[in-house]
Image (cartoon, rainbow, N blue to C red):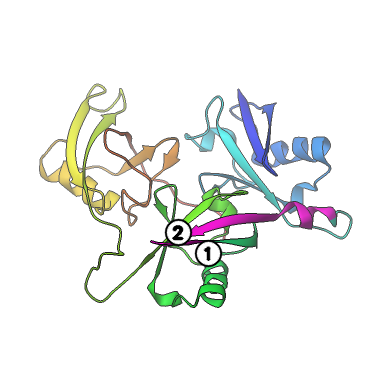
């Protein structure tokens, strides 16, 4: 199958096999770009592809899937430091500012820069990009797909939910089961976007729509996290969530 590697605001495609090791793909990239395999990190929607696994271990990787490439600059490739510098737009309710950041910076680092420039209290910040909350301070900006000229929206937390907090809304979505589960049923569900994936699972189980099993939910080729909200995953009204039997454990870190 052919996948798309995304790096430095550019894309290029390579042919890989379903059973091809992640490390072998990194070696192909090394031959093309000269970036040492050991310095590379490949990720799909924030999920790192681990060297010890094969492509078939990642069901979200299919024909045409975009895989983000990040890397650790080396002394032999100092120019890579410059390639990581980007300028983003940070939007508040009535104003916006531009900030230069490094792709490898963490969410926490971005919050600190916003605080220094704008005096917004770090503890009150809620950052959103493309409908997804940047709620894990230790994650790199590149893991959220943030690039040159990306727009980050800042909401402010308050003791009582205030006007600056993102409003909760009801979603009408479709839960599509695999062909081996309920013969590939399409299940309409209404649920709040603030509900977690675990909440959705419990709703389906309590209504006896799904049998008591472990399930894996996927949205737009992204494996969903139990403790994260539908809003965090960028789920919109009318979207389709795919459900399969099984569990997944995140490697690395």
**Residue 84 drawn at (x, y percent):** 71, 54
The residue singled out by tag 1 in the image is 107
Which of the 4 image quarters holds residue 1?
Answer: top right
Q: Which mark is residue 134?
A: 2
Quarter of the picture holding the C terminus:
bottom right
Q: In the displayed image of the protein, which residue is found farthest to the front? A: 94
Is 73 in front, or is 10? 10
Circle 1 SS class: helix
**Residue 149 drawn at (x, y percent):** 59, 49
Tell me the residue at 26%/49% (across/down).
193
Tell me where the magenta segment starts and ends, as one range. 79-96
| Vertical position of residue 173 compared to residue 71: above or below | above
**Residue 53 drawn at (x, y percent):** 59, 42
User: Is residue 109 a member of the stretch shown in magenta?
Assistant: no
Q: Earlier in the sequence, mark 1 or mark 2?
A: 1
Is 56 in front, or is 64? 64
Q: 57 left or right of 68?
A: left
Tell me the residue at 51%/75% (across/down).
115
User: Is residue 95 a member of the stretch shown in magenta?
Assistant: yes
Q: In the displayed image of the protein, which residue is found farthest to the left? A: 207
Tell me the residue at 23%/68% (across/down).
161
Tell me the residue at 30%/58% (across/down).
166
Is 138 in front, or is 120? 120
């Amino acid at each position: 199958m052919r996948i798309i590697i995304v790096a430095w605001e550019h894309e290029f495609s390579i042919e890989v096999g379903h059973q091809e090791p992640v490390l072998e793909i990194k070696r192909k990239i090394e031959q093309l770009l000269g970036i040492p395999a050991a310095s590379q990190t490949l990720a799909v929607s924030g999920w790192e592809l681990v060297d010890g696994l094969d492509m078939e271990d990642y069901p979200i990787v299919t024909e045409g899937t975009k895989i983000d490439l990040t890397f650790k600059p080396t002394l032999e490739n100092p120019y890579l430091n410059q390639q990581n510098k980007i300028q983003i737009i940070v939007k508040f309710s009535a104003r916006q500012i531009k900030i230069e950041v490094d792709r490898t910076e963490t969410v926490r680092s971005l919050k600190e820069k916003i605080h220094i420039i704008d005096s917004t209290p770090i503890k009150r910040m809620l950052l959103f990009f493309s409908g997804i909350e940047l709620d894990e301070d230790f994650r790199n900006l590149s893991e959220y797909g943030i690039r040159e000229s990306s727009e980050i929206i800042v909401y402010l937390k308050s003791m009582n939910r205030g006007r600056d907090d993102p409003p909760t809304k009801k979603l009408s979505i479709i839960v599509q089961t695999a062909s081996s589960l309920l013969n590939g049923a399409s299940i309409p569900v209404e649920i709040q976007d603030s509900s977690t994936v675990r909440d959705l699972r419990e709703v389906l189980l309590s209504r006896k729509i799904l049998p008591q099993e472990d399930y894996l939910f996927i949205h737009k080729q992204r494996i969903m996290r139990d403790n994260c909200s539908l809003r965090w995953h960028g789920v919109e009204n009318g979207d389709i969530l795919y459900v399969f039997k099984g569990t997944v454990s995140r490697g690395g870190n």
